Amino acid sequence: MNLFMFGTLLLVVALVATFTATTSYILLIAGQRTALNWGRWGVRIAAVAIVVAALLLLALFYFGRYEFDYVYNYSSNDLELRYKLSALWAGQQGSFMIWALVGLLAAPLLLRRSREFEPFVLMPLMAVQVAIISFMLINNPFALRFDVAKQIIYAEDGRGLNELLHNPWMVIHPPILFLGYGLLAIPFAYAIAGLWRRDYDAWVKAALPWTITAWVVLTTALTLGGYWAYETLGWGGYWAWDPVENSSLLPWLTVTALLHGMLVQRAHGGLRRANISLAIATYGLVMYASFLTRSGILGDFSVHSFTEDGLGTTMAVVLILGLVASLAIFIKRWRDIPINKLSENLFSRDSLFVLGMFCLVIITLIVGIGTSMPLFSQTPVLRDGLRTTFAKAFDIAASQDGRFSLQPSFFRTVTPPFGLVVIGLMTLAPLLGWRGGNMRKFIYALRMPAILAVVATVVGLLLGVRKPLSLAYLGLGSLGLGVNLLMIVRTVRGGWMRIGGYAAHIGAALLVIGFVGSSAYSSPDINMTIPLNTTQTAFGHKITFEGYATRTNNQGAEKGVIDLAVQRENGAVQDAAPQLYLNPRDGQWISNPAIIREWWGDLYISPGKYLAESNPNLLTLAQGQKGSVGPYSFVFQNFDYSLPEGHTGAETNTDEITIKARLTFYDEAGNATTIEPGLRAIAEVGNQPEPYTLADGNQVLISALSLENRQVQLQIVGLDLPILPERADIFVSTKPAVGLVWVGTVVMTLGGSLAATRRFIEHATKKRAQASVPEAATQAA
């Protein structure tokens, strides 16, 4: 059996096993107890099959098996080992493999943990895996390459990995993102299980630890993606409102709302319907994000999207069927779901949580509609109206087929007010009880955080923050920081495991302050052209260009760097080496910035171009091209040939030939003249230029030519323009407080991890206690 057959067989086995598990659990729910073992074995077999399939695909990349189309398209001999292995998830097929791997490894864990929920949870979870594995079989990662004669193509090398993906974050960012996507299927499955069992509270208690874990993982993935863009792409930002970036943000927004809604329900049974709808919507958005990214719809509007591989229609059908089935059971149970009234007191944790969740949903709708515009504008009936409406207020980008997308200005204008409300509610809610609170104690508790907020706002004003919205974010972010620090001091006495949520809110506050500094008050780029061994100053830093060097990595690949020495204001000198080189595989220039870390922010140096030493007295022209040297301009028309006197051109050997370049010459006044400098080629002697003397005494001569490429190089003798040394063209900017963005997200994820751990421990302890009750009763009997 060849590897193509073996790999495809593994996917087929995984598909059959997941389908068997799904149908078995349906039969078990219907009362057929014998189906339980079939369902469990289906889960286990599917997990083993997908693990072996993933290892096989990884081995194909490791050994460079370029007869496989997926390996050929994303790997090559010169890749470093870490990138050769991480190329597994560089394309569409591999990303589905990782996604399925996460889901099918999580399923056996749920066999042990879900207990009475097992068939109700595993049925929808395995149904999702059926869909994902079906996508892989449609677009098979083990497909071979064939020529026109239907013979397998055995290539010596592959096309290689996109040069921008040659980054350490490529090794961990994509699998973490798909880990988050896979984990989000678990609260969705529990919500469906709760509907099916008519148990509208127990599912929340079981799903909450998984929901927080999925939130932590997705937060980590989004942060890594932003940092990757910041340190690699050179445009100086970390969130470009790119459609593919936005599509991964959508489920993060709704799962953030969901986990807060779950806390309300755990406290007193409120928001049952809202939480079920959010759980369904979150995983629906995961599938929708994958559809947008992998259907080719965003191909003209995002550098991250995949091209159409025949999956667009299939994914759309699966998405619609999944939503219809989920909503059908939700609607059927709607009247059966009990409602517990929330607090009618506006100043209660209940009310603030609900308002915050509502704002997150509004932001989701805004980002979702803006991101989906290339899809909506596919329909001619909608296209013109939408385009006219949005073009009045926002920038748009149109494709050749008439579709359009909304530019970042739309998102930067519409979302910040709602985000500000979320930050404000996050700040006040911890100080209030679920049903309300004592206003005197509330105001008393706000004293120190309010002082911190006022001080931070004043400092911001002194540092140049002037926009009202930015000041509001800065003030509320600082207030939130102070409030949650206060809550940690109060709560830690009851155990440090209880501070996770407050720590996550502290991280969010730091993140907001970092957003204000690094986004709203990032300095404009200063474009500097620095000659070799000279120094120029930007933002108090002295930058010296020390040369352009080529460095070789472990695989022999050469990458050019601009060597800079950066002297800080305190006199310390640090080397900076922004990368700038030509990728030989696709002929594109690749640039990566250099970042100088400071306590207040970053000095960001992005390479523009490297200019080698050049002689401005020389000019190279192709036929029909116009160029200038000093005050003169020339247009190269064509070449003329002339033989020595007495030669007819029929001789087999000609010892001498004169080639003239016919040029249109423009003087300083713009007057045009035809001139013909020549080059006499004499055997055993060499080339002798025949210059053309201009009216001012300067001469135009041919220093080099190419008859094959129809090019000529002219030299102007007499101008004596100085030789231009090597130069580095760079862009320098500052990113104030950008470190708080990264510190904030780290604190958020650590706080979320602590909260998830606490919830897992609580749930496991409760389950053990419940299991011990029947045992104790039996012993007593």
Image (cartoon, grey):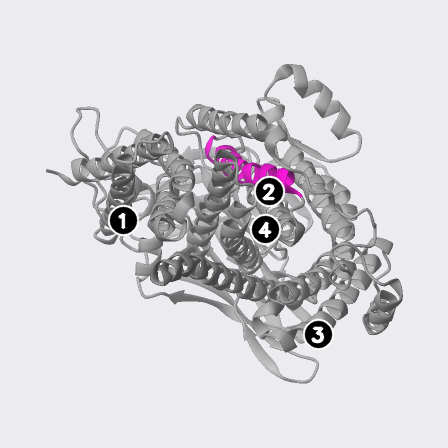
Residue 465: x and y, percent? 83, 62
Tell me how far mark 4 sits from mark 2, CA to CA: 67 Å
Which of the marked residues, 4 or 3, is nearer the chain's N terminus? 3
From the viewer's perspective, is 417 left or right of 99? Answer: right
Q: Which residues are magenta?
A: 271-295
Tell me how far mark 3 sits from mark 1, CA to CA: 46 Å
Q: Are marks 4 and 2 in contact (CB under 8 Å)?
A: no
Q: Which residue is mark 2?
A: 250
**Residue 49 location, quadrant:** top left
Residue at screen point 73% across, 46% down: 354
Residue 475 marker? none
Q: Which residue is mark 4?
A: 699
Closer to us: 490 or 137: 490
Q: Which residue is mark 3?
A: 490
Farthest residue toward the left? 1
Disc 1 crowd, CA 10 A, few/some/many (<14, 14-19, 20+): many
Answer yes or no: is residue 622 visible.
no
Which of the marked residues, 4 or 2, is nearer the chain's N terminus? 2
Residue 522: x and y, percent? 73, 60
Tell me how far mark 2 sits from mark 1, CA to CA: 29 Å
Residue at screen point 87% across, 62% down: 439
Residue 51 marker? 1
Q: Main secondary structure of the magenta part?
A: helix
